[in-house]
C-alpha cells in the first residue's frame, strides 16, 4: 500500500497568515491527490482534487500544487473558519490512503 | 441537492455484526463508485473500501479484508457496509462518500454523508 506522510502534524497560526502543508507519497501517484478539511462533528470537505484543481465553492485562498510524490496545500490568508484539520488522500491505486492529518489551530 | 444519508450505527458487542446503510439522492447513483471512510474517536480518517458503480468490483483496506463487505442496490440508490466480528478498534464514525468517477484516478470524493456512529462495547 502507498504510505502518505504529512508535515507538520500541527501548526499554530494567526488570521491573515500564509499556511503551507506538505504531503508526501511513498511512491509516485501522478496527480491523484486530494486535500480535505475536517472539523469536529462534520463531514470532511473536499478542497482540492487532482493535486491542484479547486473544488467548486471552495474559496480561492486555498491552492494545491505538486505531482508524483510531493504535494503542497497553501492557504494564502488564513480566515477564522479555516482552523481545522487537513488531510491528503491518494486515490491513484487501491487501497486508497489518507495522510495522518495536520491540525491548524490559533496562535 | 446531492445528498448522502447514513444509518444503522449503534452499540454492538465485540464479535457482533452490524450493517450500515447509505441512502443517496440527487445524482445518477449507478454511474458513480462509492466508498466508506471511518474516523475513530480522536484519530484520523481511514479509508475502508470502495465499490464500483455496477457493484461488480470491490476493494478494501488491507486490514479489513474478510471483515467488512461493501455492496450496493442501484435500484434503491443504497450503499451498504456489512461489518462482522467487530472489535473495539472498529468503533468509529462511518461516512459514505461519492467518488467523482468509476475507478481510481477519477478525482477523489466530492460528496460525503454526515456519518453514523458505531460503538463496540460489552
Image (cartoon, coloured by chain):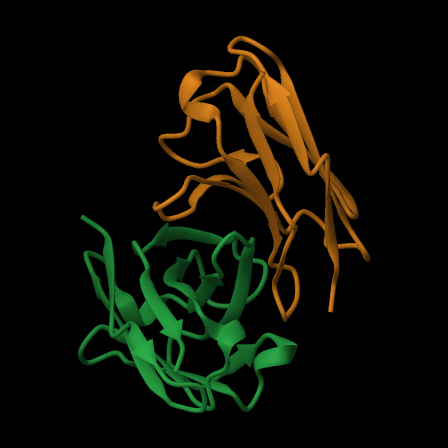
Which color is chain B depicted in?
Answer: green
**Residue at (35, 52) in percent of width and height:** B111
* B22 w.r.t. A60: above or below: below
Q: Which hue belongs to chain A?
A: orange
* B40 displayed left or right of B114: right
Q: Position of residue B122 (x, y in %)?
A: 39, 83
Q: In this picture, is B32 found above or below A101?
A: below
Q: Residue at x 22, y 73 (%)?
A: B77
Outermost residue, top side: A16
For residue A35, which quarter of the picture? top right
Callout count: 0
Question: Percent position (x, y) of residue A25?
Answer: 76, 52
Image x and y of residue A69, in percent: 79, 47
Q: Which quarter of the rendered picture does the N terminus of chain A lie within?
A: bottom right
- Image coords of residue B12 (percent x, y): 34, 81
Q: In percent of the image, x 48 and y 26: which residue is there?
A: A83
Q: Is residue B116 above or below residue A100?
A: below
In the picture, measured across the screen, residue B20 lies left or right of residue A103, that is left
| Residue found 47% across the figure and 90% down from its top | B85
Task: Kindly indicate the quadrant of the structure image that contains residue A64.
Answer: top right
**Nearest the eye: A71 or A99:** A99
The residue lying toward the viewer, choosing from B87 and A92, is B87
Please state which of residues A34 and A4 is positioned toward the viewer in this rendering.
A4
Quadrant that contains the C terminus of chain A: top right
> Relative to the observer, which residue lies in front, B92 or B21?
B92
Amino acid at each position: 500500500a502507498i504510505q502518505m506522510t504529512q508535515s507538520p502534524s500541527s501548526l499554530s497560526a494567526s488570521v491573515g497568515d500564509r499556511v503551507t502543508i506538505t504531503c508526501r507519497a511513498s511512491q509516485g501517484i501522478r496527480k491523484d491527490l486530494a486535500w480535505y478539511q475536517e472539523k469536529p462533528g462534520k463531514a470532511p470537505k473536499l478542497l482540492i482534487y487532482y493535486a491542484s484543481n479547486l473544488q467548486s465553492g471552495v474559496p480561492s485562498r486555498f491552492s494545491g500544487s505538486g505531482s508524483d510524490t510531493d504535494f503542497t496545500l497553501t492557504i494564502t490568508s488564513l480566515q477564522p473558519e479555516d482552523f481545522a484539520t487537513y488531510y491528503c488522500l491518494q486515490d491513484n491505486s487501491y487501497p486508497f490512503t489518507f495522510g495522518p492529518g495536520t491540525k491548524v489551530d490559533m496562535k | 441537492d446531492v445528498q448522502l444519508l447514513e444509518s444503522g450505527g449503534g452499540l454492538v458487542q465485540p464479535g457482533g455484526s452490524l450493517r450500515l446503510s447509505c441512502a443517496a439522492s440527487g445524482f445518477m447513483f449507478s454511474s458513480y463508485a462509492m466508498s466508506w471512510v471511518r474516523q475513530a474517536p480522536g484519530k484520523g480518517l481511514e479509508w475502508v473500501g470502495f465499490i464500483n458503480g455496477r457493484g461488480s468490483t470491490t476493494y478494501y483496506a488491507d486490514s479489513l479484508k474478510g471483515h467488512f463487505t461493501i455492496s450496493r442496490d442501484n435500484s434503491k440508490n443504497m450503499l451498504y457496509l456489512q461489518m462482522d466480528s467487530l472489535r473495539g478498534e472498529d468503533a468509529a464514525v462511518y461516512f459514505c462518500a461519492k467518488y467523482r468517477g468509476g475507478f481510481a484516478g477519477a478525482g477523489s470524493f466530492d460528496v460525503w454523508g454526515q456519518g453514523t456512529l458505531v460503538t463496540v462495547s460489552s
